[in-house]
Image (tube, rainbow, N blue to C red):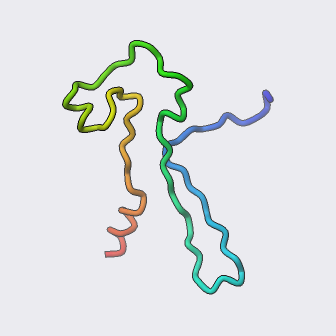
Amino acid sequence: MANQPKQVFTNMKTYQPYHSPFDPCRPIGVKFYSTPPNLYVGFQPPNLPQFSPKEALQKGTLWPIFYDYYENPYEAKRREDK
């Protein structure tokens, strides 16, 4: 166990769907998905800092530790294609 590499937790993950050699369509390539920050918090610690009520409504959470800005990974590709 001590020789195992340390796992890195990121919110944006990737995978490559299987493409059969007999599939007539071209391969999809790399797909992206986002994981929420609450997956990496075992329990909610006491006395967490809080957003103001207005800011919490805008961000969708009361606690900054659970806020996750979603950045569309496909958006940059669309801009390059234009």
Front residue of 21 and 43: 43
Residue depicted at x 42% and y 58%: 73
Q: Residue at x 22, y 27 (%)?
A: 53
Name the foreground residue: 31 vs 63: 63
Q: Residue 72: where, in percent of width, then height? A: 38, 56
Figure check: 27 above or below 56: below
Q: Is residue 50 left or right of residue 41?
A: left
Seen from the viewer's position, the closer of residues 82 and 19 is: 19
Toward the viewer: 53 or 31? Answer: 53
Q: Position of residue 63 (x, y in %)?
A: 35, 26
Residue farthest bottom in this picture: 24
Image quadrant in which the C terminus is located: bottom left
- Image position of 22 with respect to 17: above or below: below
Number of numbered callouts drawn: 0
Q: In this image, 29 relative to 70: left or right?
A: right
Tell me where residue 56 sits by quadrant: top left
Residue 80 spot, x, y in % from top left: 35, 70
Position of the N terminus by quadrant? top right
Q: Residue furthest top?
A: 47
Q: Is residue 28 left or right of residue 51?
A: right
Residue projecting furthest to the left: 54
Q: Is residue 2 left or right of residue 6?
A: right
* Relative height, residue 2 to residue 14 (above, below): above
User: Residue shown at 56%/25% (left/top)?
Assistant: 42
Residue 50, by quadrant, is top left
On screen, residue 41 above or below 72 = above
